[in-house]
Amino acid sequence: MLRFLVRRIIGAVVILFLLSIVTFVLFFGVPRDPALLMCGKTCNPDSIANIHHVLGLDKSIPEQYWIFLHNLVLGSDQFAQGPCPAPCFGYSYHTNEQVWGTLMDRLPTTVSLTLGAAVCFLVIGLGTGLLAAWRRGTMIDKTATAGAMVISSLQIYFLGPLALAILVYQTHWFDKPAYNEITQDTVAWFSGLIIPWVVLSTIFAAQYTRMSRSSMIEQLQEEHVRTARAKGMSRRYVFFRYAWRGSLIPIVTIFGIDLGALLGGAIITEYTFGLPGLGQLAVQSVFFSDLPLLVGVMLFSASMILLFNIIVDAAYAFIDPRVRLA
């Protein structure tokens, strides 16, 4: 198992290296000159030439990539704004602040939104799916399946404004969503994120309901489950002791991918509710053509997805003993 995880970590490092090449090519493949974006409206030829020299844009492409990789791994003190410790993505063209510091400032919002929504859609989605599989063929099963199909066809950009219009502006049951530090005011933190949690978790809960139901029904047909029933074990014991653990494998896989992607920024949800997270930051970086910030968001999001894929691989060993034996 340890050897397998080491291989996965090495593979993730290789993927990040290749991804850094892709982001570098995208960065310098933009038609607009990065020096013009960084210099602003008061540019002159001398200022542009100086920025080219500072950023290394006057060097060959391989040398520029080496500087990019060096700054990313070891940091740099060649920026006019001051030293940039690793991981150094440079300074934002729009705010003139370090990209890594900006990412870390926005991360708590995204983490709060992601973890709260994950708890909601896991509890609701898995609970409803297991109940539907337990009562397969009954009205409960049909209602849960039909409801999941209808809800999964909806989108956040539809549910979000609808929830705001009804719950905030029309009935005034809730305040407008906002992020507050959990260490300063826990109640305000919870109340400010409850609507985004519900909206984001609704879409995912429908997906997990269908997935957990189908996975559980498939597990109930496995030979070891039928053997346990043939030995006289109760239906409830077999359901939760044998079938339930086996059904978690595809759930854990999808959950790891979803969680990693959401930690990279729930773009539509954050933009809809005006939450200052990584997703909103990505939209702003595109709007302002802030290339260093956009590259930072891309690499950070990819790192989160790769990290949680490795965590999922490690979790397999605790869920399914066959993985440990293999």
Image (cartoon, rainbow, N blue to C red):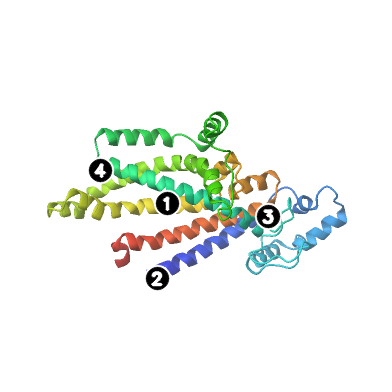
The CA distance from mark 3 to mark 1 is 30 Å
Q: CA distance from mark 3 to mark 2?
A: 36 Å
The kind of secondary structure element at disc 3 is helix
Q: Distance of mark 4 from mark 1, alpha carbons?
A: 22 Å
**Percent position of residue 324, x then y:** 32, 66
Disc 3 designates what residue? Answer: 292
Q: Nearest to the eye among marks 3 and 1: give it.
A: 1
Q: Give left or right: position of 113 versus 48.
A: left
Name the side, left or right, on which 112 lies relative to 238.
right
Residue found at the far top of this picture: 170
- Distance Cα–Cα, label 3 vs label 4: 51 Å
Q: Which of the two labelled residues, at mark 4 and mark 1, occupies the earlier sequence position?
A: 4
What x and y, as percent, mark residue 37?
A: 76, 50
Image position, residue 94 (x, y; %): 73, 50
Q: Amino acid at mark 4?
A: Trp
Residue underneath mark 4: 134
- Number of the front mark, 4 or 1: 4
In primary-sequence order, the first of circles 2 and 1 is 2
Residue 58 image-quadrant placement = bottom right
Q: Nearer the viewer, mark 3 or mark 4?
A: 4
Residue contact at pointers 4 and 1, CB within 8 angstroms? no
| Disc on res. 2 | 2
Q: Residues within 10 Å of mark 1 (few under 14, many from 20)?
A: some
Q: How far apart, in angstroms, are the residues tagged by discs 4 and 2?
A: 37 Å
Query: Which of disc 2 and disc 4 is earlier in sequence?
Result: 2
Residue at 42% x, 45% y: name it.
121
Q: Nearer the viewer, residue 208 or 19?
A: 208
- In this view, the residue in front, 183 or 13, is 183
